[in-house]
Amino acid sequence: MVGSLKVIHTANAAAPGGHYSQAVSHGGVLYVSGQLPVRANGDHSADQPFEVQASIALDNLVAILSAAGRSPRDLLKVTVYVVGIEHWPAFDRLYAKYLGEHRPARAVVPVAVLHHGYLIEIEALACAGHNIIEEPS
């Protein structure tokens, strides 16, 4: 713990591959670093189909949330970097399975390339708790 910053680390998600933390909590917000589809044991999956890669990246995200005492329902904002926008529908289906009825703010950003030849990277912001208020339409 540095000041009011709390570094989050779990062996249940891929270890950082560089000079960063899996996540940092500050002021009631959890900042989750970009998660590539690297398994918790360090095995790479760049040769796997998109759906497998997306599931691994989502598993890492959920494991980090859990290590911070949070769940997918605490997600505020998710940013997804995808190589090949044609993968967006497949990602959306998997994402809906992981999040259920919860719908945080989200951006899906098509990119030309990701580290190690991966097809997806996911970063997120989560809150300490949640009181979801649906605005009438």
Image (cartoon, helix red, strand yellow):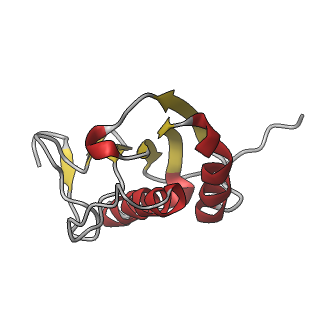
Q: How many marks?
A: 0
> Does residue 75 appear left or right of residue 38 in this picture?
right
Q: Indicate whether 14 appears above or below 16.
A: below
Residue occupying the point 23% across, 65% down: 10
Q: Is residue 80 visible?
A: no
> Does residue 6 appear left or right of residue 127 in this picture?
left
x, y percentage for residue 50?
Answer: 51, 55
> Does residue 53 appear left or right of residue 96 in this picture?
left
x, y percentage for residue 105?
Answer: 60, 37
Q: Is residue 130 visible?
A: yes
> Does residue 124 appear left or right of residue 21 in this picture?
right
Q: From the viewer's side, name the closer residue of 57 and 137.
A: 57
x, y percentage for residue 114?
Answer: 34, 37
x, y percentage for residue 70?
Answer: 42, 61
Q: From the viewer's side, name the closer residue of 74 and 92.
A: 92
Instruction: Tell which residue pokes out farthest to the front in this image.
Output: 47
Instruction: Tell which residue pokes out farthest to the right in this image.
Output: 137
Residue occupying the point 63% across, 40% down: 86
Q: Indicate whether 33 appears above or below 109.
A: below
Q: From the viewer's side, name the closer residue of 53 and 17.
A: 53
Q: From the viewer's side, name the closer residue of 84 and 137.
A: 84
Q: Indicate whether 9 appears above or below 119.
A: below
Residue occupying the point 89% across, 34% down: 137
